[in-house]
Image (cartoon, grey):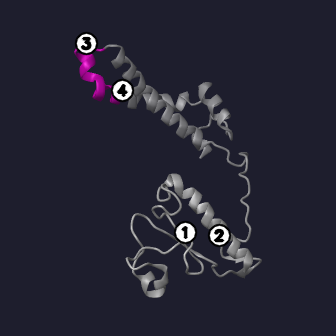
Amino acid sequence: MADSFPRLRPWSRPTEALGLLLSGATARTCLPVALVVGTALSLVNQGDVVAHGMAGLTVALKVVANYAIPFLTSSIGALLAVRDRSRAAAPAPRRRRGGPHRRAGRRLTPAGVVRAVVHRLPSGHLVDRRPEALDGQGGPVHTDGASPVPGLHWMGLPWQTRLNSSIIDGLDRDARAVADRVGRALTQT
């Protein structure tokens, strides 16, 4: 693919790509594209204004943009075609601590279930399996998101621990508390 743009040298850092663009390395291949597309855009969008002699500074800036945008777009495409990904900095390795399903090669069984409520109460299947999880009106029974059912936790409930428990602004604190509770349960098993 790099053969399509023989005058462009491979790059790996954005500053190198910007240097190639500013030095005019993309001009030979991208100026013809900008001329054709820019002319077509200018004729379609500002042609009648220019033909009637009513072109002012605003129209002139729009015409300049009609040529600049295709030039920059095709330049970015040309530069991406010669990007050398092998020299780019490698991303930091992801830390793995056994993952959620395996630890030390053995399969884990879940120590808890977190039930997130999004603007409606839980579905009926929970009533059939664990009726003690819901009150008489079908609402969740909990203390700060902890259900009396072992291993069941609630999140996103209105007034779970504070006014904003059911919105993004407050959900993070409740999620942290539930995660801590589940983590303590995991270390006890």
Classify mark 2: helix, strand or loop.
helix
In the displayed structure, does residue 178 sit left or right of residue 99? left
Residue at mark 1: 145
Estimate how packed mark 1 is, as few (under 14), some (14 to 19) or many (20 or more) residues with alpha carbons within 10 Å.
many
Mark before the other along the chain sequence, 3 or 4: 4
Residue at mark 2: 181
Amino acid type, mark 2: Arg
Residue 134 lies within the magenta run: no
Between label 3 and label 1, give the one nearer the viewer.
1
Tell me which residue sits at (46%, 67%) in the image.
Answer: 117
* Residue 183 place in picture, x, y as percent: 68, 70
Mark before the other along the chain sequence, 2 or 1: 1
Classify mark 1: helix, strand or loop.
loop
Residues under numbered marks 2 and 1 in contact, where contact means CB atoms less than 8 Å apart:
yes
Residue 54 lies within the magenta run: yes
The overriding secondary structure of the stretch rendered in magenta is helix
Residue at mark 3: 53
Question: Marks 3/4: CA distance?
Answer: 18 Å
Estimate how packed mark 4 is, as few (under 14), some (14 to 19) or many (20 or more) residues with alpha carbons within 10 Å.
some
Amino acid type, mark 1: Gly
Tell me which residue sits at (60%, 25%) in the image.
Answer: 22
Classify mark 3: helix, strand or loop.
loop
Question: Marks 3/2: CA distance?
Answer: 73 Å
Question: Marks 2/1: CA distance?
Answer: 10 Å
Mark before the other along the chain sequence, 3 or 2: 3
* Residue 181 place in picture, x, y as percent: 65, 69
**Of residues 127 and 39, the one drawn nearer to the viewer in this rendering:** 127
Which residues fall within the magenta stretch? 40-55
Residue at mark 4: 39
* Residue 56 place in picture, x, y as percent: 32, 13
Amino acid type, mark 4: Thr
